[in-house]
Amino acid sequence: MMNRRSLLAASVAMAAMPALPVMAKTTPAGFVRREGTKFTLDGKPYHYVGANLWYAAWIGHEGRLGRELDALAADGVSNLRIAASAELSPLKNSVRPAFHDQDDAYNDALLTGLDHAMAEIGKRGMKAVLYLTNFWEWSGGMATYLLWTNGGHYIDMGDPAHPWPEFPDFVSGFYRSPTAIERYHAHIRRIVGRVNTVTGKPYAEDPAIMGWQLANEPRPGGTDAVVNRTLPEFHAWISSTARLIKSLAPHHLVSTGGEGLKGSMERPGLVLSSQADDAIDYHTAHVWPGNWGWLDRTDMEGTHARALSLSAEYVQQHVELARQAGKPLVVEEFGYPRNGDVYDLSVSTSMRDDLYAMIQDAVIASVREGGPLVGSNFWAWNGEGRAQHADFRFKSGDTSFLGDPPHEPQGWYGVFDQDRSTRDIIRARAETLASI
């Protein structure tokens, strides 16, 4: 946990970063701006209750998309974090279909699905944050760019022959591979430079896009030795990619998509240095008490209070880091199992509701106090989607996409349309934020 000494060390680390020129621009109407530790929209503060809807492009051609967006909008959700990439991969749990394959053949249905999603998001006055690859295997991601460029070598996440943390150490090789990064940058140019086939508007000129993220949960490795060796290339990747995006879409915000301390070997200095570039507009943090051992999922009742306490402390640590950096903060992923760690929709979500209320109340308190925590996106919206198999597992060929991605049981963390108590919390907090 962070203390005064570690904060001082973090300050020194951030001060040691080389000064970089600010990319000045005049922002047209309708685009979200960053001003100090705040977001603004047309001169007014912009803060929000948001959701993760990573699969928006996958359902872009379905009537379901509009129904899901209407349900979210009715609950006051105004910001969506969605995937703008997926690499066709032999990795065990990678999603199908994918945006593109090793030969850079693109799936037109997904591209136009993303177009439809952005058009529908814009119609409802919502904003989207789009991430452009994934550190994890479930959408192909960095490991797939590596295997495309290293002769086909890869490690499957969760393979007993390659126990944790071999997978993140392997994926860190992405930052040290110029050819893999160039393949990824080519995808960025294709997506950020795209013209929406539904609206006719270039993505770079679309105010429905709040910003772009370099990746979902990028981290520099899994062990201290690998992280220390990789840091120069990791920082260079952040800077070069953020500046590439800014050159293509100067009116949009850019963030890393990082988890915060848990993705930074618990080093405050690494959190600050990885988000210090002037082209990175705001900080992000993710909160996963059930994945990090704070919540014992075999004894949820006995460990729930501890999990909430540690989660609240974790959020506050990132508030202090963002305040120190002079940038806004969004808690853009947080999740909790249904009671008893079961997936059936008949089971209560009362413990999850406690976490949602705590994090969204922290945003409200920060906004009222003028602090840097200005938004949150819960993970994730399942809506009307339902698991298609008795084991709650996604299988290749399934079309009922849920917020729980292919490597996780469907129903583990996602919020369904029938989860009334959770939706009541979301709506109430959204109404409070809107009134500030």
Image: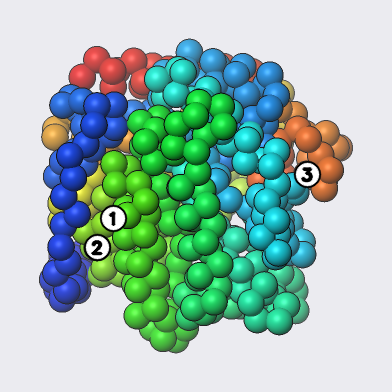
Q: Position of residue 371 (x, y in %)?
A: 17, 39
Query: Looking at the image, is 352 positioned above or below residue 158?
Result: above
Position of residue 225 in the picture relative to residue 167 (left or right): left
Q: Disc 3 on helix, strand or loop?
A: loop
Quarter location, residue 58 = top right
Q: CA distance from mark 2 to mark 1?
A: 5 Å
> What residue appears at the point 62 percent right and 41 percent down from the top-left corner?
111
Figure quadrant of the N terminus: bottom left
Figure quadrant of the C terminus: top left
Q: Give, as a three-letter code, the residue at label 3.
A: Phe
Position of residue 222 in the picture relative to residue 347 (left or right): left
Residue receiving disc 3: 394
Q: Disc 1 on helix, strand or loop?
A: loop
Q: Disc 2 on helix, strand or loop?
A: loop
Q: CA distance from mark 1 to mark 3?
A: 35 Å
Of circles 1 and 3, the one toward us is 1
